[in-house]
Image (cartoon, rainbow, N blue to C red):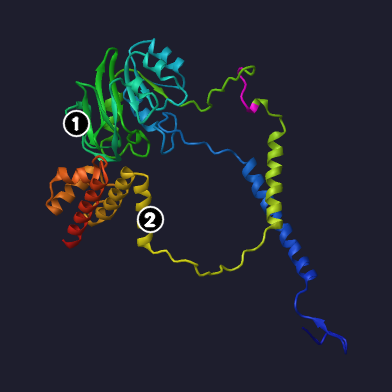
């Protein structure tokens, strides 16, 4: 629409609504500034200093995940701490005398070569090759979340420290071993003698980090396990993984075979894609509501899933789904936290319903039903317990 304005000559009019040309002229500067901002941001990220990653349980790392504080405490007590990142270096240290080998990561190491190193051995966390490093130790399928736990054993190193932030794997040691800090179906700490010394395995190493060391008896437990007076060989993952030797290219990595300018080519391609996306991108409009052509009721969905389970004879999966749903619904009603363990849930449920604890545990965590009748009986019993809790 056009109207006459005071600045227009008599008999003429000027448009007041924006035209396509004026819109393009006004948005051209905005697009140019936006492209410059994107380009500067991308170059800043690509060319900026690299962030130093945290090294879990590294005695030289001062981040929350590192263990610099524990290493300094050991040195203050007169214990020699040598940080190594290879099996050869660890074996060379062991050749100098009786030492403690602390293993926190075996990703790039041969566990069989590590197992041949004589002396005391402390294995921390779920590492590869635990069968070779700690012969006779079994990992049970049901562990426990990492939290403050009491030792509940007679091992002096644990009883003197008291409660510690442990959990993770549920371990069972060989005959004659000391087991402390119950978790799930086993314990979070196992210690036993072997031909060349003593082997200690802990399910999780968070109690040794800079973040957790000052809590509970974590520092005391770590010092009691490691600071036995012997020098410590602390094995960590190497910062630069060893190159993979390929036939005909021995000693060269994939990056050595790339041209020198490939990095800048990739950077410019990323910038070009970002600018093109900004240029060709379109603004999304408002959300359009649309009526669903078919309404599927929840009962029909449940029945259909049940028929699929029955057709595939997936009784184990169906039982797991029933048990998981029952546990999720009953845990808050019993006043327990979301991460409550098996023993806590079974004890609380048996006390509230008056049911036998073994029967409750078999219903929630037992083996899968052998037939459809057993599955139906399990579903009925779980529903019975839920109704009892709801009526209390």
* The stretch drawn in magenta includes residue 236: no
For mark 2, what is the residue?
304
Q: Secondary structure at mark 2?
A: helix
Question: In the rendered view, would you say 273 is above or below 260?
Answer: below
Question: In the rendered view, would you say 250 is above or below 53?
Answer: above
Q: Residue at (21%, 34%) from the top-left corner?
A: 151
Asked if residue 92 lies left or right of residue 288, the reply is: left
Q: Residue at (71%, 47%) from the top-left corner?
A: 272
Residue 205 placed where, x, y %? 34, 33
Q: Which contiguous range is marked in magenta?
A: 250-255
Majority secondary structure of the magenta segment? loop
Q: Secondary structure at mark 1?
A: helix
Looking at the picture, tell me which residue is in the foreground, 19 or 220.
Answer: 19
Q: Earlier in the sequence, mark 2 or mark 1?
A: 1
Residue 249 placed where, x, y %? 64, 19
Looking at the picture, tell me which residue is in the foreground, 346 or 316.
Answer: 316
């Amino acid at each position: 629409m056009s109207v006459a304005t005071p600045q227009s000559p008599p008999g003429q009019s000027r448009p007041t609504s924006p035209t396509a040309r004026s819109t393009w002229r006004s948005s051209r500067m905005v697009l140019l500034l936006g492209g410059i901002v994107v380009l500067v941001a991308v170059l800043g990220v690509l060319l900026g200093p690299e962030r130093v990653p945290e090294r879990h349980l590294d005695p030289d790392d001062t981040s929350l995940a590192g263990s610099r504080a524990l290493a300094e405490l050991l040195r203050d007590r007169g214990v020699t701490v040598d940080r190594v990142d290879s099996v050869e270096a660890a074996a060379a240290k062991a050749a100098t005398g009786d030492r403690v080998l602390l293993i926190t990561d075996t990703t790039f190491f041969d566990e069989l070569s590590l197992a041949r190193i004589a002396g005391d051995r402390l294995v921390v966390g779920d590492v590869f090759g635990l069968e070779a490093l700690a012969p006779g130790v079994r990992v049970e399928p049901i562990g426990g979340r990492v939290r403050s736990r009491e030792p509940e054993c007679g091992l002096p190193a644990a009883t003197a420290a008291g409660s510690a932030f442990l959990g993770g794997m549920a371990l069972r040691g060989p005959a004659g071993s000391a087991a402390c800090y119950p978790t799930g179906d086993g314990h979070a700490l196992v210690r036993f003698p072997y031909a060349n010394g003593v082997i200690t395995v802990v399910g999780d190493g968070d109690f040794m980090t800079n973040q957790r060391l000052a809590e509970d008896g974590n520092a005391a437990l770590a010092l009691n396990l490691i600071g036995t007076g012997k020098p410590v060989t602390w094995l960590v993952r190497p910062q630069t993984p060893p190159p993979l030797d390929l036939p005909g290219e021995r000693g060269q990595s994939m990056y050595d075979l790339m041209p020198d300018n490939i990095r800048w080519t990739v950077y410019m391609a990323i910038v070009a894609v970002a600018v093109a996306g900004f240029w060709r991108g379109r603004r999304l409009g408002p959300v359009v509501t649309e009526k669903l052509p078919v309404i599927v009721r929840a009962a029909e969905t449940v029945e259909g899933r049940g028929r699929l389970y029955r057709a595939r004879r997936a009784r184990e999966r169906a039982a797991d789904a029933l048990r998981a749903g029952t546990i999720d619904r009953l845990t808050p009603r019993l006043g327990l936290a979301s991460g409550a363990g098996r023993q806590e849930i079974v004890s609380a449920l048996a006390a509230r319903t008056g049911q036998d604890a073994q029967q409750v545990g078999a219903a929630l965590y037992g083996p899968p039903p052998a037939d459809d009748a057993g599955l139906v009986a399990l579903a009925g019993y779980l529903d019975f317990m839920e109704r009892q809790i709801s009526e209390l």
